[in-house]
Image (cartoon, rainbow, N blue to C red):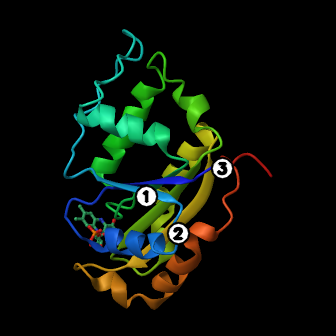
C-alpha cells in the first residue's frame, strides 16, 4: 500500500523550528510516499464542543476546515504531529485538533477508531530546553493517544531551538531526522501494559 504522510503543523508561527525539522525528516521519505502538509495556524479549527452525552456528532462539511482535516486524517497511513513544545506538551492548536478526535470517535459513518487502528503516529517537536526529559508529557500524550486508537507509534523527533532557524544548529537532531521515519514504529502501548 502506498504510504500517505499527513503533517499537521501546530506552531503558532510560520516557518518555525518544528516545521524546519519536520521538513528535514520528510526529505528522506521515498519519492512514492505522498506528503500533505496542513498548518493549523493557517486553518484553525473551531473550539471543540463536548456533545458526547447529549447528541450524535454530525460529520463536518467536506469544504469546512474540520471536514478537510478529518478527511486528510482518515486518508493518512502516517500522521505526523509537528508541534513545538508549549508548556511541556503539545501546542493549543494541536490540542484542539486532538480534542476533535473525541467528536470524530462518535461521528456516525466514520468508524474513526477502526480506521486509524494500525496506522502510525509520529511526533516532531522543537523546544527551547536542552533536556529531552522535559518533553515527557508531550511524548506521553502522543503515545497514549496512539495506544487508545490502536495505532503504531514512531516516537518523537526532538530538536533544540528558540528563535526561528535555531534548530538547524542542532546537529544531533538533524542526524536523527535523516533516519527518523525509517525507524521502527511498534504498536503503541499504555505505560501500564507490559510488553
Ligand atoms: C507558548 C509557548 C510555550 C513554550 N513552552 C516551552 C516549554 O514548556 N519548554 C520549552 O523548552 N520551550 C518552550 N517554548 C519554546 C518553544 O518550544 C521554542 O521556541 C520552539 O523553538 C518553538 O518552535 P517553533 O519555531 O516551531 O514555533 C514555548 C514557547 C511558547 C511560545
Q: Which residue is mark 2?
A: 29
Q: Which of these two is toward me, 178 or 53?
A: 178
The image position of residue 5, as x and y in percent, is: 48, 55
| Number of callouts | 3
Q: Which residue is mark 3?
A: 188
The image position of residue 145, as x and y in percent, is: 53, 43
Give the residue at x 39% y 71%. 23
Horizontal side of 45 relative to 140 (left or right) equals left
The image position of residue 173, as x and y in percent, is: 47, 82
Give the residue at x 21% y 46%. 43
Work out which residue is located at the far top of the displayed protein and give it: 55
Place residue 82 in its image quadrant: bottom left
| Ligand 1 contact, mark 3 (Cβ < 8 Å) | no
Separation of marks 3 and 1 at Cα, in angstroms: 23 Å
Q: Are marks 1 and 2 in contact (CB under 8 Å)?
A: yes
Separation of marks 1 and 2 at Cα, in angstroms: 9 Å
Q: Quadrant of ligand 1?
A: bottom left
Give SS at disc 2.
loop
Work out whether 23 lies above or below 166. Answer: above
Q: Which of these two is toward me, 102 or 121?
A: 121
User: Disc 1 or 2, which lies upstream in sequence?
Assistant: 2
Is the residue marked by circle 2 packed among few (<14), some (14-19), or many (20+) residues within 10 Å?
some
Is the residue marked by circle 1 packed among few (<14), some (14-19), or many (20+) residues within 10 Å?
some
Horizontal side of 179 relative to 101 (left or right) equals right
Q: Can residue 99 be seen from the camera position used here? A: no
Give the residue at x 79% y 50%. 194
Work out whether 126 lies above or below 48. Answer: below
The image position of residue 102, as x and y in percent, is: 43, 29
User: Disc 3 or 2, which lies upstream in sequence?
Assistant: 2
Q: Which residue is mark 1?
A: 35
Give SS at disc 1.
strand
Work out which residue is located at the far right of the displayed protein and give it: 195
Amino acid at each position: 500500500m502506498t504510504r500517505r504522510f499527513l503533517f499537521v503543523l501546530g506552531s503558532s508561527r510560520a516557518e518555525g523550528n518544528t516545521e524546519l525539522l519536520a521538513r528535514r525528516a520528510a526529505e528522506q521519505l521515498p519519492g512514492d510516499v505522498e506528503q500533505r502538509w496542513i498548518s493549523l495556524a493557517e486553518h484553525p479549527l473551531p473550539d471543540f464542543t463536548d456533545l458526547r452525552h447529549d447528541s450524535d456528532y454530525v460529520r463536518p462539511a467536506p469544504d469546512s476546515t474540520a471536514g478537510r482535516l478529518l478527511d486528510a486524517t482518515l486518508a493518512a497511513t502516517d500522521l505526523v504531529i509537528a508541534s513545538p513544545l508549549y508548556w511541556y506538551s503539545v501546542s493549543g492548536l494541536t490540542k484542539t485538533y486532538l480534542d476533535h478526535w473525541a467528536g470524530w470517535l462518535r461521528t456516525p459513518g466514520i468508524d474513526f477508531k477502526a480506521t486509524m487502528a494500525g496506522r502510525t503516529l509520529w511526533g516532531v517537536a522543537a523546544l527551547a530546553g536542552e533536556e529531552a526529559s522535559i518533553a515527557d508529557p508531550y511524548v506521553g500524550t502522543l503515545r497514549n493517544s496512539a495506544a487508545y486508537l490502536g495505532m503504531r507509534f514512531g516516537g518523537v523527533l526532538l530538536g533544540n531551538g528558540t528563535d526561528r532557524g535555531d534548530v538547524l544548529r542542532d546537529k544531533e537532531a538533524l542526524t536523527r531526522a535523516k533516519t527518523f521515519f525509517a525507524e521502527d514504529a511498534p504498536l503503541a502501548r499504555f505505560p501500564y501494559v507490559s510488553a
